[in-house]
Image: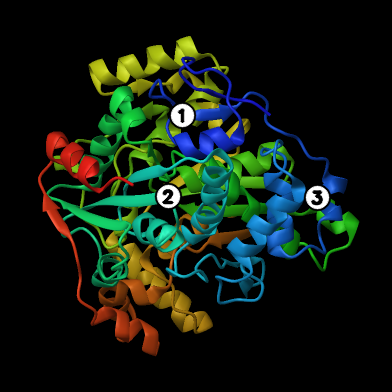
Amino acid sequence: MDFVSTRGGMQPASFGEILIEGLAPDGGLTVPVDLPRIALWDIEAWRGLSYSELAAQVIMKFWTDIDPGDLEEITYNAYRNSFNSPEVVPVTELTSGFGLVGLSEGPTLAFKDMAMQFLGEAIPYVLKQTNSRLNIVGATSGDTGSAAEYAFRSKPNVSVIMLSPKGRMSDFQRAQMYSLDDDNIHNIVIDGVFDDCQNLMKQLNADLDFKKQVALGAVNSVNLGRVVAQSVYYFWAWLRITDKMTEQKRAQTKVSFAVPSGNFGNVLSGLVAKQMGVPINKLVVATNENNVLHEFFSTGVYRPRSAADTHITSSPSMDISKASNVERLIYDVLGRDPEKLLAAFKELDETGVIDLSHEVSRFKDEFGIYSATSTHADRLRTIKEVFENTGVIIDPHTADGVNAALAHRDDDEIMYVLETAKPQKFAETVIEAVGKPAELTAAMEEMLTKPQKTVDMGVDIDALRDFVLENAV
């Protein structure tokens, strides 16, 4: 299978190549020339597979030039040895027809592990095959950074330089990232917001000479490998939700997912699974006060906010005003036409807006995408109600998802919320909601007391470039 750029300026590349590149060299995002389609009876045939076996089958549809045995070993190492649950992704019904897809059983207790553990095995495999090296520069609003660092810590021929916004993450998130002392892990605290971090990362990647000089790559959600790996748990969740149904019942049942959203990669992964053949009814985009995506899907107008206008919220991993993965959806909406895509993003650069209001009905009718927004008060109420009704404590991002799910769930519909993280990562909000924190394990308590190692930096591309040069492998 070949992959190209949304902006049309990239020669077709293989899956292994785009894993290493991250961003396309023309500044666009990589997409498959043709999305693989899977018949429902073939998905049904996967019902008895373990999670790692299912991942190999799904990813193989994209990574067509790898030995199947090698891919099975990669997914086995990614998912069978690193997760706390034997299922990897437990699917739990909370009330009749409503539940959680458990995505926080990995080493950093957040859904980002689901893709990053795969990349942590797949990328070193490609580097070994090609006798190459890779310097990963990433930007994180909370969970991506720690997931990347835990996936690549001490891996050969890889360095990770992660940018995070000063004072914009929880104490737990900071401790997870900043307490790592592996020689190939570097944490830079940027005096700004997440979008500043993401813009710095994009500026580096846009400098093609520098990118080639230091073998620069990205594992943020702009990396299509992450989107593909995340699509697997939609296959898994649909299979688990329908396990006990008859074939006739499955055909009659509408299964939908609500997805807490920041950079739109998680929802996009669900759209990929839906377009491949998983019978997903709705994908509900859950936003917080930074509700650019809710405005987009409600009106068709994409209007990212400035860094100064990005709100600090109690679901900080969603404090993003410019969702990079929206470009892949807009590419689809515009008929996969690179010239139209370039014109749209030129409009964005010149006016601050992409106006697709004439296409807004397609979001629901063609793609099944709905949206909702939540406030801090909504999160507190939802965390409290879920705890009182089920005994389960959820994190604030997942609470945004529950709130969005309830706003759009029909009476005859099964709706599951994709869990974002363990509630221990957001103790302050959980205490405010239910009067007590989620209980810490001994390992968590030890991590919170470890010394932290960071480098402080302003929003300064020259300083970042110098740091990368000094610390590249």
- For marks 2 and 3, give the CA distance: 37 Å
> Residue 29 got which mark?
1
- For label 2, count other residues whose C-alpha is less than 10 Å away and answer few (under 14), some (14-19) or many (20+): some
Frontmost of labels 2 and 1 is 2
* Tag 2: amino acid: Asn
Please say whether residue 410 is visible from this viewpoint: no
Comes first in the chain, label 1 or label 3: 1
Q: Position of residue 92 (x, y in %)?
A: 62, 72
Which scheme is used to colour this image of the protein? rainbow
Q: Secondary structure at mark 3?
A: helix
Q: Determine whether 94 is above or below 253 in the image.
A: below
- For marks 1 and 3, give the CA distance: 28 Å
Comes first in the chain, label 2 or label 3: 3
* Tag 3: amino acid: Ile
3 or 323, nearer to the observer? 3
Frontmost of labels 1 and 3 is 1
- The residue at which mark 2 appears reads as 157
Please report contact status of discs 2 and 3: CB closer than 8 Å, yes or no: no
Instruction: Specify whether 432 is left or right of 398.
Output: left
Q: Quadrant of residue 154?
A: bottom left
- The residue at which mark 3 appears reads as 43
